[in-house]
Amino acid sequence: MSGRARLALCAMVATLCAGGALLPLVDPFTWLFQAALLLALVTGVGALGRRVPLARPLTVGAQTLAAVLLLTVVFARGQAIAGLLPGPDAGTALVDLVRDGVRDVGRYAIPAPVTPGIRLLLVAGVLLIGLVVDALAVTYRSAAPAGLPLLALYSVAAGLSQSSAGWLWFVVAAAGYLLLLLAEGRDRLSQWGRVFGGPVAGRPEAARGGGLPIRRGRRIGALALGIALLVPAVLPSLGAGLLGPTTDGAGPGGGGGTISAVNPLVSLQDSLNQPEDREVLNYRTTAADTRGMYLRIVALDQFDGTAWKPSERTVTDVPAELPRPPGLSSDVSVTRINTSLSTAQWYAQNWLPLPYPVAKVDIPGRWRFEPEGRTLVGDRGQNTHGLQYQVESLQVRPTAHQLAAAPPPPAALRREYTKVPDSLPAIVGTTARQVTRGARTAYDKAVKLQDWFALYGGFSYNTEVRAGSGTEAIARFLEDKEGFCVHFSFSMAAMARTLGIPARVAVGFTQGTQQPDGTTSVGLKDAHAWPELYFQGVGWTRFEPTPSRGSVPDYAYPDTSQATGPGGPDHAPAPSAVPSTGPSAAPSCGPGERRAGSGPDCAAAPTVSAAGPPDGGLSPGTLTLLALAALLVVALPAVPLRWRARARTRRLAGGPGGAAAADPLAAWQELLDTGWDFGILPDESLTPRTAVARIIRIGELQPDAAAAAQRVATAVEQVLYAPQPVPAAGLAADVRQVHAGLRDGAPRALRLRARFAPHSAARLRWSWTARWSVLRQRCRNSRPATAARRAAAALRTAGWRRGKRV
């Protein structure tokens, strides 16, 4: 093999070695074989061009043309001219693929699926770097500068990769570069060798220059590798996000050090947009109720108007017993629970997922404790890769009364956690004050903010929304009303701070999904962010403003049995408009339907307006239409009332046995809708017993009515969970007794609303919408067959006519 051929082969190997660093970014890795084949063909074209020989620029041009043809054949053959030449259609197809690839890179978390767009980016990138390396090292005989494109390829891969084996790919890439240097030629290495010393006495090969270039090349490579390994050790490192592996966030061991800021925005969005919900961890806990079992990774407490991030704080050794959470008094109900957690082998980042607040942690490895956020961070490369650990934590259950009666927080804490930058748009504070108008306590304001985002403000959950940045990001979100958990939590925390409520943002995972074996699985799609607000006597308290995500704590439900103010279901303000003071013409939706995304938004009922009379007077047809319109306007408000009465009769009638034979599930549905009509918003995530306790508490039911509600809940639990359910009698009478109790305890305005405009009549609209969707789908499915029949009939007619003419 000639010297140039050997050098070309080494250039191709060096490129593939550097491209190997891209393997952890995607799955599967078969794209690399395709890239190697195309790179070998381009390298062969270069070898032929140099053998002819062609001028150097023509050789590089021939290789470039070969690369374009190969990419066209592989990725746009259907649009290419004769399946080979890149015409306008093929160019458009390649540009579209590149655009799709860039979008997919920003959409998927690592390892991303190899979509056609991502495959084109990977193969074309390796092909481009290989062409440049071949041109520099072989065509222009300058192997040293060829290390720059190799370094660029490795740096991009290393900067994005979430693999803990980055050092291995560095060694592979460096070995490829050294191989290229050693193969470049004796003369070049001999010139470099004079810098490091003269001939070695007593060795004949030194006088001939044979062994000296190789030794000098090895010394150059060793020096380059040493510098490359030493420089990253003394320079600050960049994290890769909260949900992927990060660099060591703690300082040196010994009880001190700091943790640095990270931004979870992109990591959260990438995780939520993964096509496959990969398991991050699973746990087994002694908690009776896991709905509030959120696993915090880190708390973001510094707000600069552009993003939320954690402050740089001192970390210490993990104590045997963690200190009591700040601000938590002995009057608040607290339950200690134990949880065993196990992380996936692929999940490697240096922040430890923990329930909040954690009291004790039993974990192997090098971990440090950050007291302010009560988080654990890995030290000297420690991460969560395949980890098993035990946690003892507290389930804090404050009541709404305790939160409402909370005294002012300490001045220092309030000063630190209510800071907002001067660059924050004024609409953020204005909207916060408008939404919470009429609220007297910090707790009332927090609940109004939460429910405005989650229920009444017209917001929708969408993980495809551009994350955005800059001081206008929150204002843009308040205007567009579309985003995912990061937007909701960031905005609510910022608005709470403008109201003087200490606030921060927590990032981690929701409670996950229970498995048949008793464990709970937490996946990538459980990644979440939520606001934490501080109340003296309770401490940092979780709220849930994101619609259709997570679970609302029991203490965060508003008491809707009283008249609502701005921001409630009847008065939901928008940032750009003053809230309407008139009553809604249609029933509003409850939180269970909004959060589950099972029903459409409840809008006001449309009104029918009559046009003005024409110059010639009203025709009989116009009068008829006007009469029908007037009749519709008069009859339309009675539709919800009539439907609600029929639904109640049907549910409670049961079978031939009358009230005694009422179906427990139907009676339970009627009980929930009755509470909904009287302003007690249903929550389908609650157990029957908890839901009834909530109806009794908010509706202030008397003992007889409360006992009737509990009997209905017991009957439902029998049907759902008992192996042999015990038949229940008198459920219809119990539901009617609850209805009477709610009616007697409600204000007059609420009784009228429940009677003539019941909230639960929204189910009628949902039923009509579902039927209409089914009908449209059936019509859409039948169109192709109808079109085909018409086309066949037209062809038969045309053929008959031609035959007649003949």
Image: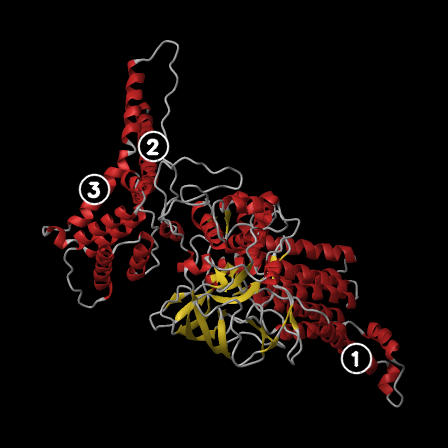
How much space separates mark 3 and mark 2, taking CA atoms?
54 Å
Q: Which mark is residue 646?
A: 3
Q: Secondary structure at mark 1?
A: helix
How much space separates mark 3 and mark 1, taking CA atoms?
91 Å
Q: Which mark is residue 219?
A: 1
- Would you place residue 218 above or below residue 803 in this image? below
Q: Nearer the viewer, mark 3 or mark 1?
A: 3
Choose the circle earlier in sequence order: 3 or 1: 1
Of the pair 275 and 43, the residue shown nearer to us: 275
How much space separates mark 1 and mark 2, taking CA atoms?
82 Å
Of the pair 56 and 416, the residue shown nearer to us: 416
Residue denoted by label 2: 795
**Residue 601 can be seen in this image:** yes
How many numbered discs sit on the rendered protein? 3
Q: Secondary structure at mark 2?
A: helix
Quadrant housing the N terminus? bottom right
566 sits left or right of 750 in the view:
right
Residue 463 in percent (x, y) is at 50, 53
